[in-house]
Amino acid sequence: MKQICRLLQRIWGNLPCRMSIAAAFAVVLGVGAGRAFIGSVYVVEGTSMEPTYPEGTSLYGTPISTPVERGDVVLLDDHKKDYAVKRIIGLPGETIQLWRGRVFINRQMLVEPYLPKHTYTCPMEQMHRGATFILGEGEYFVLGDNRPNSADSRTYGPVERKQIKQRVPLPNDFVCAYCAPYTLPAYGRSLFRPAVTNRAGAKAIL
């Protein structure tokens, strides 16, 4: 033990060694600070976000400093080895319903322009039945863009805010999702119906 202490003292007394140790420590601190405040680069593995982010695509994840919004692409901890890349669909307090390949937010049909045409969103194990998810405070509903081949909130349920680690910047020409003037049909009916418009012209969600 004394020999080890003497060796350490001798190393620390050597100016070049001290400088090397200080430089290595600075590098470690710099990498940690960069990941915390600037961001990191990730490589997509798997097909759950195709065709938006094909396998092998490099993604730049940035710290989240503003509220998470619908349509955001995020890196989240789904309790597996690596972060998962998913899109935010449902926000805290909302009711998400999947019916006949469509997504409904509080019974109003969601239009997702970033998805390829004829993309259907169905419950993973209930292809011919609907599914309802009621989000609590601090809970989010996430989906992959490759809806037929994505493990997401349809299988493991809503995710908590603390699981969402970073945000992937969206392109400048990105078109956000929006609610169309169609509401979920009443139980036992199969046709969409437009939202009711009151005299003032405001649309009411049924």
Image (tube, rainbow, N blue to C red):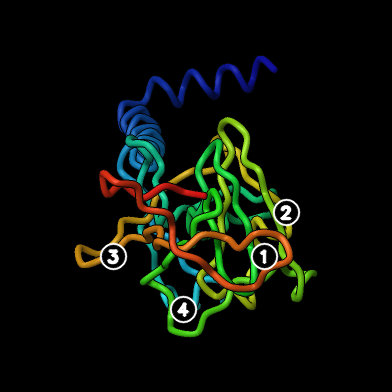
Please state which amino acid type lies under the numbered disc 4: Pro
Cα gap from disc 1 to disc 3, whole angstroms: 24 Å
- Secondary structure at badge 4 equals loop
Please state which amino acid type lies under the numbered disc 1: Ala
- Across and down, in percent, residue 141 comes to 58, 50
The tag earlier along the polypeptide, 1 or 2, is: 1
- Across and down, in percent, residue 172 comes to 20, 63
Residue at the spot 63% in from the left edge and 57% down from the top edge: 97
Classify 10 Å Cα crowding around label 4: few (below 14), some (14-19), many (20 and above): some
Classify 10 Å Cα crowding around label 3: few (below 14), some (14-19), many (20 and above): few
- Across and down, in percent, residue 8 comes to 52, 22
The tag earlier along the polypeptide, 1 or 3, is: 1
Location of residue 48 by image quarter: bottom right
Q: Can you identify the residue that label 3 sits on?
A: 175
The tag earlier along the polypeptide, 3 or 2, is: 2
Marks 1/2 in contact by CB < 8 Å: the verdict is yes
Q: Locate residue 94 relative to residue 149 in the image: left or right.
A: left
